[in-house]
Amino acid sequence: MDGACSAYGVEERVLVGNPVRIRPLGRSRRRWEDYVKMDLQEVGFGIVDWIELGQDRDRWRAVVNVVMNLLVP
């Protein structure tokens, strides 16, 4: 009987209750993953699967060095 009461409580909260959390206005936040993809596109590695690239240390280090050299004026 507890299972039925708790399920009814959830349904009632969904149908009648107010949302607990307020969604922030504006565009969604960027994730670390989004920044990695943007940086790779800026360097010219946009099509490359960045997860596989990150698993190969030597190639990832080469890409990071290229990006770091672009940031230095």
Image (cartoon, rainbow, N blue to C red):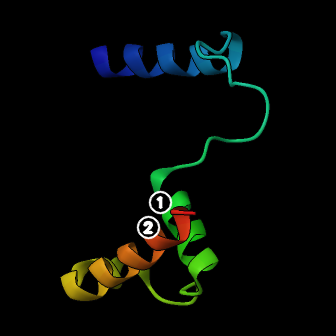
Q: Residue at x 61, y 78 (%)?
A: 41
Query: What is the quadrant of the C terminus in the image?
Result: bottom right
Residue at mark 1? 33
Question: What residue lies at 57% left-to-right and 90% top-to-bottom?
Answer: 47
Query: On the image, numbered disc 2 is attached to which residue?
Result: 68
Relative image position of residue 37 (x, y in whole percent): 54, 70
User: Which residue type carries mark 2?
Assistant: Met
At x 43% / y 67%, what residue is drawn?
A: 68
- Dot 1 lies on which element? helix
Q: Nearer the viewer, residue 1 or 11?
A: 11
Q: Is residue 25 visible?
A: yes
Q: Classify mark 2: residues with Cα within 10 Å, few (<14), some (14-19) or many (20+).
A: few
How far apart, in angstroms, are the residues tagged by discs 2 and 1? 18 Å
Q: Is residue 65 left or right of residue 33?
A: left
In the image, what residue type sits under mark 1? Glu
Find numbered disc 2 in the image and state the secondary structure of the residue it sits on.
Answer: helix
Res 1 seen here: no
Q: Position of residue 5 (x, y in %)?
A: 40, 13
Residue 64, compared with residue 32, is above or below; it is below
| Residue nearer the viewer, 69 or 8 | 69
Q: Where's the N terminus, which quadrant?
A: top left
Quadrant in which residue 16 is drawn: top right
Residue furthest out toward the front: 73
State the image coordinates of residue 20 (x, y, percent, origin top left): 59, 12
At x 46%, y 72%, the residue is 69
Residue 72 versus residue 60 in the image, above or below = above
* Residue most extreme to the right: 26
Q: Nearer the viewer, mark 2 or mark 1?
A: 2
User: Which sits in the foreground, 58 or 8?
Assistant: 58
On screen, residue 41 versus residue 50, left or right, reads right
Residue 11 numbered tag: none
User: Which quadrant of the figure has residue 35?
Assistant: bottom right
